[in-house]
Structures are given as C-alpha cells and as structure tokens.
Amino acid sequence: MPFQSARWQKKLNEYINKEPPDKIVLAGDIADLYSLSTHGNKHPRWENKLDVETAAWGDWMDDLRQSNKKAEIVYLEGNHEHRWTRYVESNAPKWRNLAINWWDYMALDDFDIRLVKSGHRVPTGCGQVFYIYHGHEHKVSSRIPGGVAKRMAENLNRNVHAGHTHHHGQGLVNVGQTLRAYHEGGYGGDIRKPAFGFVAHKNLPWALGFTVYDSEDRHSPLPLFVKV
C-alpha cells in the first residue's frame, strides 16, 4: 500500500466475497514504505509521504477486517515493513526501548490482526502443512520461477511458501526419502506506480495474483494460485 493494483484488489474482493476464508495470511510487503527506502532517485511526490503511506496502509487493513469479520488474520513482516525497523535502528536506535515499531504504530491489535513469526503453519490439502515465509530472510536466490521456494524446501526439509521475488511457481521435490511441496507466490502491486520505478522498462516475470490454500483438497497439497 498505497501502490496496489486496482485489478488485483478487485479480484481479491470478488474471491473473498464468493469464498469467505477462515484464515488470511499477510505474507509481508503489504506496505511499501517507499519514503523509507534506500533506493536512490525517489519520485519527488512520494519522497516524504510516510503519513500518506501509513494512512493508506491502515485503511486497507481496516477494509480487510470489515469484509472478513470472522476470519483469523495474521501478518508476517516482509523486507518492506523491515524498512521501518532498519530506519529506527540506523537513525534513532534509542527509540527501540520505546517500542516505536511499525506493528504498534499501525495498531494491529485494533484490527484484530496478529503479528506472527516467519515459518507460520497453514494446513493444506492431503492433510499436510505448508510453512509460510516472506522469503527474504533466508538469503536464497534463483532465476527460475518457484526456485527460491524450492531451494528453501530442500534446505528446511518441509513444505514451503515464499513470496518476495513475485515469481510464481510451484511443484514437488524429493528431499531425502520425503516428497516436499513448494510454492512461490505473486504480488499485488501496480508496476506503473512510483514505488516500482527501480524496475521500470524491465521485462520481469512477475505474476499478479494471490494464493489460496484448501485443507479439504484430497488430491494435492499444492495451493491454487489465482492469477489476475
């Protein structure tokens, strides 16, 4: 937020209205925090608009909660939310003792949204469990869509969901004597907006969409990727 795709948001709302979820996992980078970015050549309109960004962030979470009053909602920190933490540590380290962190400032408790650690468990098909990571925390790279999640599944020996790269891909991989599933999600941003200026004019294999897990699926542990 506030650089999300209108098409993505519309599709997400339609899906939620049709298939109300029991649980929603916000897997990081919900906020961009563009004004705290260390990327150079910022758009002048957004360089000092942290107040506007946080207002849009809060409004989005409020709308999400109001349209999903019964769902459990959890939030993992992504590298973009971590921009806040890094900024405080670099510029006002003593403020850490005052709990000036993003989850308190954004009052996640007021939205009944729970901050959880990386590696959050989510039930999936065939009675299995996926572990949800943002993906940046494991310092794994791959040019192949789904490659980051695959390497994490191999390293951790568990079913892994990773975002961060926006390269959708999924599959199964043998880890020792065990078959593990992996899934790499997409993104919900509008690449034409200022926050994506650092990738302007690049032909990126990013996938606009969101992921749905169905614990009642008896055919496959792999989730559904709803492409926009």
Image: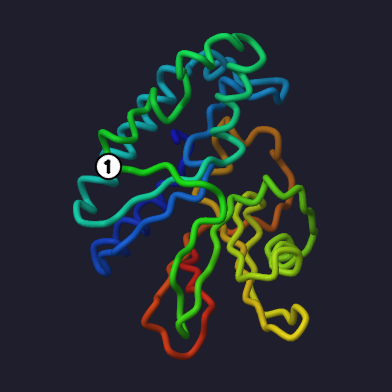
Q: What element carries label 1?
A: loop
Q: How many marks?
A: 1
Compared with residue 67, is residue 48 higher up or lower down, i.e. above or below? above
Residue beneath label 1, please? 112
Q: Which of 84 and 210 is in front in this view?
A: 84
**Residue depicted at 79% across the width and 54% down the height:** 141
Is residue 74 found left or right of 78 in the rendered image?
A: left
Indicate left or right for 220 with 93 as reference.
left
On screen, 87 above or below 20?
above
Residue 32 place in picture, x, y as percent: 53, 33
Picture quadrant of residue 41: top right
Estimate the x, y position of residue 150 in percent, counting from the top left: 72, 68
The residue lying furthest to the bottom in this view is 219
**Residue at 30%, 56% in the rendered image:** 13
The kind of residue tagged 1 is Asp
Splitting the image into 4 quarters, where does residue 193 fall? top right
- What crowding class fits label 1: few (fewer than 14 Cα within 10 Å), some (14-19), or many (20 or more)? some
Q: Is residue 144 left or right of residue 228?
A: right
Residue 128 versus residue 1 in the image, above or below: below
Q: Which colour scheme is used?
A: rainbow
Q: In which quarter of the image is the N terminus?
A: top left
88 or 146, which is in the foreground? 88
* Location of residue 24 in the rendering, given as x and y in whole percent from the top left corner: 37, 56
x%, y% of residue 14?
Answer: 29, 61
Q: In this view, does 225 lie above or below 115?
A: below
Residue drawn where x is 48% and y is 90% of the image? 219
Identity of the residue drawn at 64% across and 70% down: 158
